[in-house]
Image: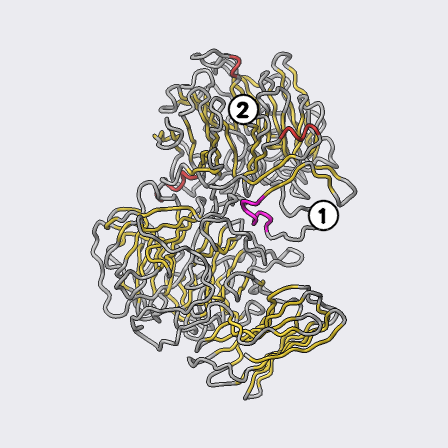
Amino acid sequence: MLLGMSFALMAITLIPMLSGPFHVAKAAQAATQAYTWKNVVTGGGGGFVVDTIFNQKQKDLIYARTDIGGAYRWNASTSTWTQLLNWVSPDQWNMTGVESLATDPVDPKRLYIAEGTYTNSWTSMNGVILRSTDQGNTFQQTAMPFKMGGNMPGRGMSERLAIDPNNDAILYFGARSGNGLWKSTDYGATWSKVSNFPDTGPFVEKAGDAYQGDPLGIVWVTFDPATGTSGSPTKTIYVGVGDNSSGAKNIYRSTDGGATWAAIPGEPTCSVSGTTVTCTGGATWDTGSNVTTGYLPHQGKLDSTGTLYVTYSDWDGPYNGGHGDVWKFTPSTSTWTKISPIPGSDSSNDYFGYGGLAVDMQHSGTLVVASVNSWWPDALLFRSTDGGATWKRIWDWASYPSRTLHYTIDVSNALWLNFGNTAPVDPVPAVKLGWMIEGMNIDPFNSDRMMYGTGATLYATNNLTAWDTGGQVAIKSTALGIEEEAVTGLISPPTNAHLYSTVGDVSGWRHDDLTKSPTAMYSIPYAGTYSAIDYAELNPNFLVRVGYGDPSASPVVTSTAFSFDGGSSWFAGNKDISGVSTSGGSVAAAADASRVVWSPKNAQISYSTDNGNSWTASANIPQNAVVASDRVNPKKFYGYGQGKFWLSTDGGATFNATSATGLPQANDPVVVKAMPGHEGDIWIAGGSTGNAYGIWHSTDNGSTFTKLSSVTSADSIGFGMAASGQNYMALYALGVIGGVHGIFRSDDAGNSWTQINDSQHQFGSTCCVTGDPRVYGRVYVGTNGLGIFYGDITGVSQPTVTPTASATRTTPTATPTTGATPTMTATATPTPTTTPVTGSNGVTATGVVASSSGWYSEEDVKFNNTSAITAMTITITVQKTTGVTYNGMYTTAGNISLSHVDNGTTITYTFTLASNQSVAPGTNQIAAAQLGGTGTTHATTGDLWSITTTSSGKTNTVSGHF
């Protein structure tokens, strides 16, 4: 992951079901149906690509490993990557974290992958070594007697798994957690511990911590192929160890094929005196400001002459590191030489550790090194062609803040890699060279090609040597096929884009085309990780998402974002709920977009009727309950927390526990969803092993629930278009049915189920599922590290999936069991009701009915201005027809004062540009008046708008009607 951690996925969404008696399905093996599965394309990777590994014998045979998202093989004909681990089952989810990978330099068909995500209590599963004789098309497994840590600290420190280049039956693996060095002599089928290896790698980031407290272990193994002959063991082997205790050696060597081991004489070390750390080569720091006590060897690689190059950092990475050096060891003279581009002794310029190391095997002494993390203004890469005697930087300072760049960067495969920075301010670029740079390698067959992974993508260049002659190195994001997102939420509304996602670290996207990368991530605001997203069922143009804002930032990054145009544009809520610190949580939009209810992590559940400008605490419901909205009645909201089901009938102001029993236990993860078109019809999926676990259904607002006996366990549920002849939406579930852990569809409200995935498409840890309300059989599945998948019935022609520009919602015909059904027709896209009017100062405006239903309406003034507006007043006057009430107002145009007056016959909404402020040139800027209702659609006859602006030195008024 970009931020290196997987996310515990807990969400509740509500789903109503068929009216009438509910028939419990009997436990039986589910039928099966063939599905075609594909990744939803994001194009940029979306997580930490730890390393790329080139085979030394076969050209273009390249693998990439990730920390939680599996392993990939390069497809040279398409310049894309192919995932090798989609077959990993939910029960073995820990196997999608890759600790290390090795491709055989003797027999290129052989591939080995060391798998295991965590070494702590988050999993009970030990690590495994996967063995393949067909380049990863199929595997055999060897279970190891210890855990592995593909997503643990120090996961970027080169490769722990290595194959003897002279006798490829021999492999070594460096373990974590004090388990030492291990060896296989039968192509990885069996393993034994190297009992005489002298160091287990005791470094820990933070002793006693559940995640940071595990010993780093043996971090890399490197063979010198020139010290052996074909068929015999290689004599010289180097091993890097996670040990930076005072005076400790941390690189060991064997010169007799592993029979004996010793630290290399003269290797650089660090010692501690009091609170002062002093290292060979002159680097020094105080442990009061930097608690590490020495250097750790991040990468150790040989060139063609047998010279060993090592990058060092004072932390294990991949996030940290404040000091570093680069050294080389020349075996022929047994000498160590410091070759740092910026030495650790230069305390004013060395503010980072070294990580990435690429060695050109065709030209001895040619190498590239990189900062693990130079966060500002960007990463630093250095290149030497003389063994480190001299270096060239990838960029240099010019006259501050300007820089001279010796590279170009191309992210056309994933334009969102600018992270929303469309107006960069020097010296920080819109698109960075990267961060968390550890795995970096030059193609052994092509000195011009180099690849390196970052915390968000994979970069490559095919003209690396241009650096040597003063040219620019052309760097390009080359991650097509790598989908490493940790998905936290998926929705598929009845109009607009077919899919919206929220993900960890890289925000999420509106997916206008499942086969193409989105052009932009959610970036207004940019909170990195978003935990949930919802839309208003009767007004799908309205969207809300919640994430992890930053109250300490300047300006403050809030945790909520809202859209009134189907996610084409967003604006941030002005403030978070009082007491919010970590944010995230779940969110629910009222069916008519009149309000949202937000349940942030460890803070009071609250509701907002003004799109995040203010929040009011909800009564009674406990913190951290999962919230969801009824999809028919805008006043009804639901929650699940502390083992109880909660109901609100006053728009989230108060909740009361229902009498429902037999549900999941307190703190068990659950998903709650309500069925569109059926008031009070709710589905719950969740629970835990040993407690209540499965799927429950209610048709009475959660007063009672019936558990489906056919479902052994389930973690998520979703809805999609009904099957032909059915009047109830299809159900999709992630769980165990008929003894099989899989992905299932039910076309008859849960009475029977069909498994729709197979053994090759299990996707490890899956978080969430939703069907598509416009495409029968289509399902979207979010994973924790393998991205988003969509499945279609094999052999069934599917319509082209493009956003619906304008549509009328057709609802199921089943009658809800309680309550009245409002008219559910909603205008999907704002529809102009007047011709645009252009004033003499160039400002063009029009009145738009953005939404119209019996429960919620919105009338907008949309305007375009080619020059800055320095003064502006907009008014919208609404006739108070039956049931109409003020329900909020907003604008996308900047610092605008908002007010309204209700005189009993009309409501006047006024938007006034604050003094000394201006509205920058723009298109489709909005001032919106929001109306509530009681079920009768508001007639816009007599509703008026006007806009008075000063622009280009001219003041002009234009007006019209809705």
Height in image: 324 above or below 696?
A: above
Q: Which residue is mark 1?
A: 426
Question: Given the image, on which type of amino acid does mark 2 rest?
Answer: Phe
Q: Quadrant of the C terminus?
A: bottom right
Rounded to the nearest angstrom, the CA distance separating label 2 from label 1 is: 38 Å
Height in image: 537 above or below 886?
A: above
Q: Can residue 374 be seen?
A: yes
Question: Given the image, on which type of amino acid does mark 1 rest?
Answer: Asp
Q: Along the line of sight, which residue is nearer the eye, 210 or 181? A: 181
Q: Along the line of sight, which residue is nearer the eye, 466 or 622? A: 466
Residue 259: x %, y % from top left: 47, 14
Label 2: state its secondary structure.
loop
Q: Which residue is mark 2?
A: 445
Height in image: 227 above or below 242?
A: above
Q: Measuring 43% from the left and 16% from the top, which residue is drawn there?
A: 167
Label 1: state its secondary structure.
loop
Residue 269: x %, y % from top left: 64, 25
The circle drawn on residue 480 is none
The span shown in magenta is 411-419
Q: How dense is the environment of label 1, judged by Cα within 10 Å: few (below 14), some, or many (20 and up)?
A: few
